[in-house]
Amino acid sequence: MQQQKEVSRRNFLKNTSLVTAMGLSIPQIISTAFAAETSKKRVTIEKDEVILFQGDSITDAGRKKDDSSVNNASALGNGYAMLAAAEMLFKHADKNLKIYNRGISGNKVYQLAERWEKDALDLKPQVLSILIGVNDFWHKLLGRYEGTVDVYNKDLRALLDRTKQKFPDVKLIIGEPFAVTGTKAVDEKWFPAFDEYRKAAREIADSFDAVFIPYQSVFDKAQSSAPGVYWTNDGVHPSVAGARLMAEAWLKAVKG
């Protein structure tokens, strides 16, 4: 019996070493990132709900701006929003979900606010997913914008207040702004200042009882399997693999 236990122990250690050497699988990466979150809240997807993805180029992902149709590949783009939507529509064919993407490349929070009535409130979403913030920092770093983290914080809170006033029961998902080092656009100049935007997004999610997606942790942990440039060439915009990684993280934030 003792010998069998020792063999089992050696096999366990061998298999663990192999996993460590090969890196974590995507499900392990996602689970590990979410396990570190203090809140275990998830959004429940109900029948006949409208799900809206909002944000900047990461969400936009080349979608056709003149296509306002629902559940349409060209309107959803070629990024994480489309991949998450495809899985949702496949998994919940009986729920009659309506999924939109209204991300626009280059947007900062104040630009979301300028188009919020048409591109958000008029769609009457029951589930609203927002990923915004990298441009609020990046464009400032490049000298193209004068906003600060305090402006980002204030503007995003005002936008969510406005949304909650019209739809008190809307279910919110806040994606963490992320930046991957060792890539074309992200270097040491980003930190620690960019971390303040990540912190603000997390605090806003807590304040509005939103589900928070820890994208920075997801991308950090993914580098145990492949380098940062595999997941995102410039450190901000995901590759094909990075988009799938983000979609899986988004799907981890919902249930039903």
Image: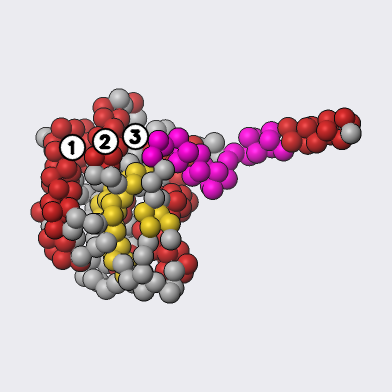
- Is label 1 in contact with label 2 (beta carbons under 8 Å)? yes
Q: Identify the residue under disc 3.
A: 186
- Is label 2 in contact with label 3 (beta carbons under 8 Å)? no
**Horizontal placement of 153 versus 199: left or right?**
left
> From what the image shows, is residue 25 above or below residue 77?
above
Residue 151, image x and y in percent? 13, 36
Q: Quick check: is 98 in the magenta stretch?
A: no
Q: In which quarter of the image is residue 187?
A: top left
Q: Identify the residue under disc 2.
A: 203
Depth-wise, is mark 1 or mark 2 nearer the camera?
Answer: 2
The reply to whether residue 12 is in sight is: yes
Residue type at tag 2: Glu
Per the image, label 3 sits on a secondary structure element best described as: loop
Residue found 13% across the figure and 45% down from its top: 158
The reply to whether residue 80 is in sight is: no
Depth-wise, is mark 2 or mark 3 nearer the camera?
Answer: 2
Residue nearer the viewer, 1 or 141: 1
Magenta stretch? Answer: 15-39
Per the image, label 1 sits on a secondary structure element best described as: helix
